[in-house]
Image (cartoon, helix red, strand yellow):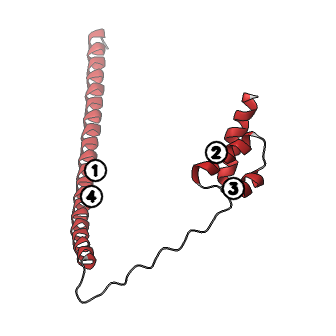
C-alpha cells in the first residue's frame, strides 16, 4: 500500500469519526430540547391548573366574605343581650408589668434563684430562666 493511499484512508477514517461525533452530538441536542419542551409543557399545565384552583378559591372566599358580612349585620328580629360587666380585677401579690420585670432583673443580678424570682415577681419559669441567663452574667461582669 502506498503512502498516498494510506493517508487517504486515514483522512477518510478521521472524516467518518468526525461525522459520527457530530451526529451523536446532534442527536443528544435534539433529545435534550425534546425533554425540555416536555418539561415546559408539563409545568405549563400545572401552572394553568394552579391558576384555576386559585380562581376557584378566590370566588369561594368572596362568597364566604359575603356570608360573614350578612351575619355581622344587626337583625331586627334578633335582640342582642347586653354585655355582662367585666369582673373586678383580683389583686395580685406580685408587681405587675414592667415593675415586676425590673424587680426580677434586680433579683437576678443579686443572685436570686429561679424559684425566688418566679414566686416574688410573677414571671413564668421560662422568663425567669431567661432573666437569670441575661442578668446574672451582666451582674458578674459589672462587679
Q: Secondary structure at mark 2?
A: helix
Q: Name the side, left or right, on which 98 lies relative to 17.
A: right
Q: Are marks 2 and 1 in contact (CB under 8 Å)?
A: no
Residue 61 x/y as whole percent? 26, 69
Residue behind mark 4 = 46
Is label 3 or label 4 in front? Answer: 3
Mark 3 or mark 4: whose residue is earlier in sequence: 4
Residue 7 x/y as whole percent? 29, 13
The Cα–Cα distance between marks 4 and 2, rounded to whole angstroms, is: 57 Å
Which label number is shown at residue 39? 1
Q: Name the side, left or right, on which 124 lies relative to 71.
A: right
Residue behind mark 2 = 102
The Cα–Cα distance between marks 2 and 1, rounded to whole angstroms, is: 62 Å
* Residue 73 drawn above or below residue 61: below
Residue behind mark 3 = 125
Tell me if mark 2 has few (under 14), some (14-19) or many (20+) residues whose alpha carbon lies within 10 angstroms of its own.
few
Q: Are marks 3 and 4 in contact (CB under 8 Å)?
A: no
Is label 1 or label 4 in front? Answer: 4
Amino acid at each position: 500500500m502506498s503512502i498516498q493511499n494510506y493517508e487517504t484512508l486515514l483522512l477518510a477514517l478521521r472524516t467518518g469519526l468526525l461525522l459520527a461525533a457530530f451526529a451523536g452530538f446532534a442527536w443528544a441536542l435534539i433529545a435534550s430540547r425534546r425533554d425540555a419542551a416536555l418539561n415546559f409543557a408539563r409545568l405549563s399545565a400545572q401552572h394553568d391548573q394552579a391558576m384555576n384552583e386559585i380562581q376557584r378559591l378566590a370566588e369561594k372566599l368572596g362568597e364566604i366574605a359575603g356570608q360573614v358580612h350578612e351575619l355581622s349585620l344587626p337583625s331586627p328580629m334578633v335582640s342582642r343581650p347586653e354585655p355582662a360587666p367585666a369582673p373586678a380585677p383580683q389583686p395580685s401579690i406580685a408587681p405587675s408589668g414592667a415593675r415586676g420585670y425590673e424587680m426580677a432583673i434586680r433579683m437576678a443580678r443579686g443572685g436570686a434563684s429561679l424559684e425566688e424570682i418566679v414566686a416574688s415577681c410573677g414571671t413564668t419559669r421560662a422568663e425567669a430562666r431567661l432573666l437569670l441567663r441575661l442578668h446574672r452574667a451582666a451582674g458578674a461582669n459589672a462587679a
